[in-house]
Image: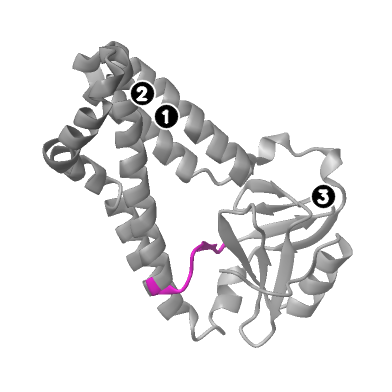
Amino acid sequence: MFSRKINIVIQAISIVLFALVAALIPQYALLVFILYFILFMILMTRTGLKSTKSIDKSAGPLLFKEGASAQAMMYDSLLTEELKSQFKSTIIYLILPFTAFMLIPLYTMFIEPYIRSFLQALGSGFLINFLKFIIMYLFLIGVIQGMRFLVSRKTKQQKQLLIPRSFTLYKKGLVVDGRFLEYSRDMCVKENRERKFIEIHGNKLPFIIRLYTLEVSKLYTKIREVGLSECREIKA
């Protein structure tokens, strides 16, 4: 799983590389942008989960296994509304990137002329195109990220919920719906006995993991045993 800093570095390098290619072959600038757009979306949607095929003895002993989370979900009267809100925000997040394509003509007509005029003093056509494409990529990314931030503020939840139907707790990591997640130092847990779940939060996690079980106390104890502490301040 990539950290936020590594993702930022990868995005910065990709912007420079794609802008360089677009400046060298401007007739294919749209194709280059589409390729960058695809790479950007892949980085934004990485889950950081590994295949269970890589699980071996290094995962440690099995501590807890839940195969019927759906039964525990029935006790959570607030879950339906949370999932409705998450579904709406997910649809909006899926639509947001396509606004980038809609903004390209507007950017070309109203913003790019001023950028090009400002860069004319550089003289070199290649350098002008290179900087122009970098500015365009940064502009579009800024718009998309800004809109995502506004949506997250409105829904009061910046991260999506990951609710597995089954999960297995190991000493070194957690298997959720057939995918393996290794514990990290920044992870913490939140217990809600009334709603029958345990949540795992982490700065590096792109989502909030919610584990439903009828044995909340037992699961909480086992999770604390692997080294995860109680969350002091939950940031959704």
Q: Earlier in the sequence, mark 2 or mark 3?
A: 2
Q: Position of residue 203 (x, y in %)?
A: 65, 57
Residue at mark 2: 19
Where is 66 relative to 120, above or below? Answer: below
How many numbered circles are shown? 3
Q: Nearer the viewer, residue 91 or 32?
A: 32
For the magenta stretch, what is the residue range? 154-165
Where residue 79 appears, x then y in whole percent? 49, 78
* Left or right, residue 223 beside residue 165: right
Q: Is residue 2 visible?
A: no
**Image spot of residue 119 (x, y percent):** 27, 26
Helix, strand or loop status at disc 1 = helix
Q: Give the Cα separation between the discs numbered 2 and 1.
A: 6 Å
* In the rendered image, the vertical position of residue 146 relative to residue 216, given as above or below: above
User: Mark 1 = which residue?
Assistant: 15
Q: Secondary structure at mark 2?
A: helix
Q: Please tell me the numbered disc located at residue 172.
A: 3
Q: Does the CB distance between marks 3 and 1 fall below 8 Å?
A: no
Residue at (60, 46) in percent of width and height: 4
Q: Residues within 10 Å of mark 3 (few under 14, many from 20)?
A: some
Type of amino acid under label 1: Ile
* Residue name at image x 67 percent, y 73 percent: 213
Q: Amino acid type of disc 2?
A: Ala
Which numbered mark, 2 or 3, is in the foreground of this view? Answer: 2
